[in-house]
Image (cartoon, coloured by chain):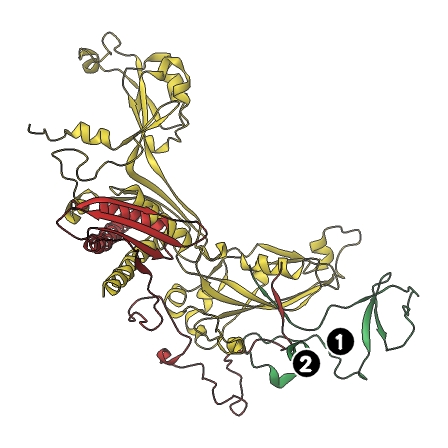
Chain colours: A yellow, B green, C red
Amino acid sequence: MPHKPPTKEELERRKIVGIRDEIITDVTSTDFPGHYPGESHVWDIEEFRQGVRVEFHQNDPLEASFSLIGVDASIANAFRRIMIADIPTLAIETVFINNNTSVIQDEVLAHRLGLIPFQGGHEGLHKFLKWWRKPTDESEVNSSYYDFNTVSLRLEVACTHNDQAAPGETDPTKLYKHAHVYARDIEFCPVGRQDRYFSGADAIAPVNPDILIAKLRPGQEINLSMHMHKGVGSDHAKFSPVATASYRLLPTIDITRPILGADAAKFAKCFPPGVIGLQKVTRTEAAQTGSGYEGHEGEVRAVVEDPMRDTVSRECLRHPEFKDKVKLGRKRDHFIYLVESTGQWHSDAIFLESVTHLKKRAMDLEKQVINMVR
Amino acid sequence: MSREEYQVPATGSANTFGGGSFNVPAPRDYAGEGGGVMHYMCGDCAVRVPLEKGAPIRCQKCGARVLYKERTKRMVQFEAR
Amino acid sequence: MPRATKFTKEEPSDAGSDVAMDEAPTSHQPESRDDMSIDPNENEEVEEDEVEEEEETQRVRLLPGSTPTAASFEFLNEGHTLGNALRYIIMKNPDVEFCAYAIPHPSEAKMNVRIQTFEGTTAIQALEKGLRDIQDLCDVVTDKFIDSREKFAAGISA
């Protein structure tokens, strides 16, 4: 029996994850060969190229939002996981404490220093700096630091009384000098060729200079030096280039039966502002038989304006007057990414790097498989 | 355990780490003092009290008998994790 | 527990620029070397260099009990990131009868992939094709992303 090719509506319907009040339906993707008889869902790179789209919504250095449309969840998730865990970043790894008489314990101070995000010249960070591996022989450790694998920083702060303070002053920042130790007090000490890549605006510096590291009182001081190395988020979260990288699926709202008048206003209130708009029923719409608008010309009706703003709270399903008139869902292949960089990489560069990383992993494994066969 | 044995810290010529060179604060440089004088912190008045071996344990200023040892001059290394 | 190691050295030595020539040991390598390839500790994961054949451990293994058309593979240091993506791509291959991945225990970074094929091709061929398809996919996504980014930048400045 010949199979009819699927209609456009059918193809669109297949892409939607159903959101009902108590259950989520059609979660898994079904575009595999053999699932639909008569249809070929064989992997074809050209077909994929036709179907993939990227649309940007925002592209700032620290925050980027874009839609990746036409890929499967497993691929989109792979990109997300790589962004969080496998993109190399520079962070403080070793802290050499010469003196710490503050109330913050040495190990706590070291931990806090490791979590401070740094920025620097991109060419130096991504191309010049290489990985540092701890030598297996303990005695060689101190000679394994070179200008291309280690960045050195220094923090020297001592708190003293401020003689110029007004009598009766209670604010510690005015009573004492250097009572608060901020990230901006960390000095970058370039070594060797680092001057070429990290000078001026490109210098290694904390992304946010106002991060409070410790508080001191007169007589206390902190004197330490630090080594920064490259690492990945899977090793320690301080190496993750993103505050977080996440995606959500595009929500769909399908108004199946007309919602008019006061109901429409109430319906619009069930969603964040901008999702539902109110429009007047036109004469042509009222003229269409079977549309449900007959006799309602001039009344206000609810219309879906911008589903991307919806947060899918399913509030409209809680009201009996709307429950049967609307179908909620999400598009299974439309991923709205939000990449929030901590400052070392640009947000769009992080996504590109993650795609490149997946490709490189697949390449390396392909070599390994060929090796295994041999 | 030779690593644990006490070594008199060298000055000047051992600063091979160009980028991370730092100044050891002057009052702490005890290579110059008649060896063996340790400084302790008084518990009451927080003044640095020099005390030799065998000397009676009292603060010079306020006479308190509780003295605390100062933090070590040795460098301590930590992983920032 | 803090991991502190007491060093009696003053500070860590670096190949600093202010080491006097006569004090530097003979093994000391001068810092401003333009040819970095002679460095013994150097190993990058990046770009144009060849795979370090000497250091590379075998990260893919054929598990026992595999036949040419029904095979299980064990990947080391891989997880859901590659596993789910690989499974999806391999399932899009019409000659593959069955494909699934599993992580035997979350504490171990091992991933097993099982591929069963119809008569036309072997499991290893399906695995290789899957890995190649992932690379093609990444190329397409990169191109589309860069195009879209440029369009967006042009649209903003317009």
The image quarter containing residue C4 is bottom right
The image quarter containing residue A296 is top left
In the orientation shown, which residue stands out farthest toward the left? A2
Residue at point 45%, 84% (across, down): C29
* Numbered tag placed on residue B27 in the rendering: 1
Q: How far across and down, in percent of the image, does residue C21 sit?
A: 51, 90
Q: In this view, does A25 lie above or below C130?
A: above
Give the side of residue C128 with respect to residue A270, left or right. Answer: left
Give the side of residue A174 with respect to residue C114, left or right. Answer: right
| Front residue of C64 and A189 | C64
* Mark 2 burial class by Cα count in 10 Å: few <14, some 14-19, many 20+: some
Residue at point 75%, 76% (across, down): B27
Q: Mark 2 points at which residue?
A: B9
**Looking at the image, can residue C92 be seen?**
no
Give the side of residue C115 with respect to residue A148, left or right. Answer: left
Give the side of residue A229 with respect to residue A13, left or right. Answer: right
Image quadrant holding the N terminus of chain A, namely top left
| Front residue of C155 and A289 | A289
